Image: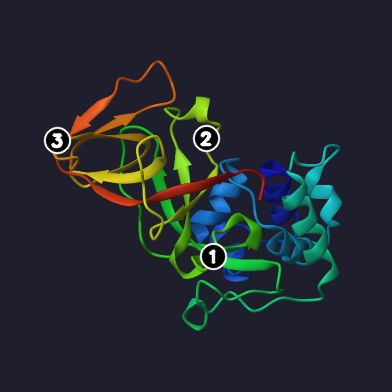
Amino acid sequence: MGRRIQSARIEAGFKTADEFAEELPVMVGTVRSWEQGRSKPRHEVLAQIAELTGKPISWFYGDEEPDMTDEIRRLRERLEQMEKGPAVADHSTLTPDLSIAEDFTLLPLLGTVTAGPGGIPDENIEEYHYIPRTFIPDRHTNCCFLIRVTGESMVDAGIQEGDLLLVCNSVEVESGDVAVVEVDGEAMCKRVRWVRDEYGRNRRLILLSDNPDFEPIEVDQVRVVGRVMKSIRDL
């Protein structure tokens, strides 16, 4: 899809990703991410790309449809039926619980988090994605957001590079849960295990990778950003 987006952009006369991004509700870095195959546009944005470039949406998928869960497929079909959704270019007018329909919620993508050694999330909103409400715990919509993952330390948990992590910072993180944590200014996605003292209080945290190539990390001070509720692919 990335190569097709780049080809369509150039054919349509947009010489640079910057020019193309100006016509879409995304940042230039997002366009480059699409074209480099690191992410894919959400379907309503792909519809705008198709309109700008004069290509049918099916052309961008090529011969194979993306591998999607039933709920993601239902979301895409629902979006196809909508003539237009809310404008997302002006992020200042949006709130995390803005929905296009009662079944879906618009959540912000806050940047990237590394599953393994790496940087911290950029808490500037990059874009928004429509997420089925069934993915989100009841009454926690305003506390949920998305982060794109890089790295391979959680592959055995089904979390792969490029996935979107649905993170909720209002759900308690218990031993065995997968969470986004920040240690010494570095954010990462790990499975957590609390080490308690004789009084049952959480004293230390062991960060576990679901990949045998990565060693556990034991820390005394950590900021738990939020619990990972779901890993979403091909949205």
The residue located at (63%, 43%) in the rendering is 233
Give whichever of discs 1 and 2 has the lower sequence position: 1
Disc nearest the viewer among 3 and 1: 3
Q: Read off the residue under disc 2.
A: 159
Front residue of 5/84: it is 84
Front residue of 48/211: it is 211
- Name the residue type under label 3: Asp
Dot 3 alpha-carbon crowd within 10 angstroms: few under 14, some 14 to 19, many 20 or more: few
Picture quarter containing residue 175? top left
Give whichever of discs 3 and 2 has the lower sequence position: 2
Q: Are marks 3 and 1 in contact (CB under 8 Å)?
A: no
Front residue of 185/23: it is 185
Residue furthest to the bottom in view is 93
Secondary structure, mark 3, is: loop
Disc nearest the viewer among 3 and 2: 3
Q: Read off the residue under disc 1.
A: 107
The coloring applied to the image is: rainbow
The image shows residue 222 at horizontal and vertical percentages of 21, 45
The residue located at (51%, 35%) in the rendering is 161
In the image, 30: left or right of 170?
A: right
From mark 1 to mark 2, how far is it between C-alphas? Answer: 19 Å
Dot 2 alpha-carbon crowd within 10 angstroms: few under 14, some 14 to 19, many 20 or more: many
Front residue of 54/150: it is 150
Secondary structure, mark 1, is: strand
From mark 3 to mark 1, how far is it between C-alphas? Answer: 38 Å
The residue located at (14%, 40%) in the rendering is 199
The image shows residue 224 at horizontal and vertical percentages of 29, 49
Picture quarter containing residue 122? bottom left
Secondary structure, mark 2, is: loop
Q: Read off the residue under disc 3.
A: 197
